[in-house]
Image: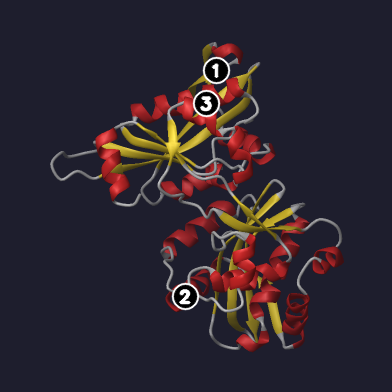
Amino acid sequence: MPLARCWGAGGKGWWMPGPSHRQWDALVAGHPHGHLLQTSNWAALKARFGWERQLVTSADGGNLAAGAQILYRWLPSKRVPGRLFSIAYVPKGPVVHWDDPAQVRSILERMTANAREHRAVFLRIEPNLLDSEMPALEASLVDAGFRAANRSIQPRRTMLIDITGSEEDALKRMKPKTRYNIRLAARRGIVVRAGTECDLPVFCQLIRATGERNAFGVHSSAYYRAAFDLFSPGGNVRLLVAEYEGRPLAALMVFALGEMAYYLYGASSNRERHRMPAYLLQWEAIRWARVRKCTHYDLWGIPDEDKETLEAGFSHRSDGLWGVYRFKRGFGGRAIRWASAFDRVLIPPLYSLFRKAGN
């Protein structure tokens, strides 16, 4: 195993073998503030598309206790060949017990030191915390030199579905119209099946069409293939395809880690929409998550508005994420808002340029 600088109680440090990918992922999966975007497979996915991974960890009594997976992207320079400056990003991390000030301080210091070593202009973190939890914790971030970022990378607001209990319990939590559409899709001949690697071209074709129809950006086909290839061996991803008479109409990728499932990528055709394929497709994804012993299902992204605005606007607005909110709200989740991103500025003049550019 690689060597890593780890810190014990009281800030005393020692050299010890760094954690393996399996050890790190076990910590993330079982931690109350762990997240899919802090797993080794996520880092491996981003590494295929221009990012580098650094793992900073902390030990307590020789056992892995906390840490952060930092992603670096090196900035191109026209004047200086090679890598001159980078940006550092910790998606949905660090993985720490936020009620342990010594642990938080230790990890933030280690992350900052690592970012300096990589000549980062700034270090951006997106804690896996609810926005309502931040007032009690923001002072510790400010004391460590962090400030509120211009924007977050991941969606601030989402719908989180409780999928515990029986299938009937999960269905009862949904809006009546959504339950009706799930059953209607089955009556109208929609069949949902598990996809394989051979279905990835169809999935990518559908997601490109969805992006064009709804005016949002999508990843390359290579990106979705890499995500499927990396998460499949551990059974942490499921590709589902909804068909009518053998013709694919909709597809999605759902991921799972610990007790949480994440609906990250979905797509649908304009054909046969009256058969409601997306509803049955989403229900089958929820059923898969339940088999995986997940307790919650994250629908990943709705308009960043308060509850009153969401309920007042969903029936007539279709811009931005409003169309998907109208669909997602029917599955009976609760709208939650995640904590904002925070930056540790390391090279102020360059950071100012980033801020002016809206980053």
Q: Are marks 1 and 3 in contact (CB under 8 Å)?
A: no
* Quarter-of-image position of residue 254: bottom right
* Side of 170 relative to 237 (left or right): right
Residue drawn at point x = 34 percent, y = 26 percent: 117
User: Counting residues from the N terminus, which is met first, the one under dot 2 or under dot 1?
Assistant: 1
User: Counting residues from the N terminus, which is met first, the one under dot 3 or under dot 2?
Assistant: 3
Three-letter code for the amino acid on which mark 1 is drawn: Trp
* Side of 323 relative to 152 (left or right): right
- Outermost residue to the left: 79
Q: Nearer the viewer, mark 1 or mark 3?
A: 3
Q: Is residue 25 above or below residue 304?
A: above
Q: Which mark is residue 7?
A: 1
Q: CA distance from mark 2 to mark 1?
A: 48 Å
Q: CA distance from mark 1 to mark 3?
A: 9 Å
Q: Nearer the viewer, mark 2 or mark 1?
A: 2
Task: Provide residue 30's location: percent of width, then percent of height.
Answer: 69, 38
Three-letter code for the amino acid on which mark 3 is drawn: Ile
Using a 10 Å C-alpha cutoff, classify the residue at mark 2 as few (fewer than 14 neighbours), some (14 to 19) or many (20 or more). Answer: some
Task: Provide residue 210's location: percent of width, then percent of height.
Answer: 49, 75
Q: Secondary structure at mark 2?
A: helix
Residue drawn at point x = 50 percent, y = 30 percent: 141
Residue drawn at point x = 63 percent, y = 26 percent: 65
Q: Which mark is residue 107?
A: 3
Q: Which mark is residue 215?
A: none
User: Which residue is labeled 2 in the image?
Assistant: 214
Q: Is residue 37 above or below residue 224?
A: above
Three-letter code for the amino acid on which mark 2 is drawn: Asn
* Quarter-of-image position of residue 71: top left
Q: CA distance from mark 3 to mark 2?
A: 40 Å
Using a 10 Å C-alpha cutoff, classify the residue at mark 1 as few (fewer than 14 neighbours), some (14 to 19) or many (20 or more). Answer: many
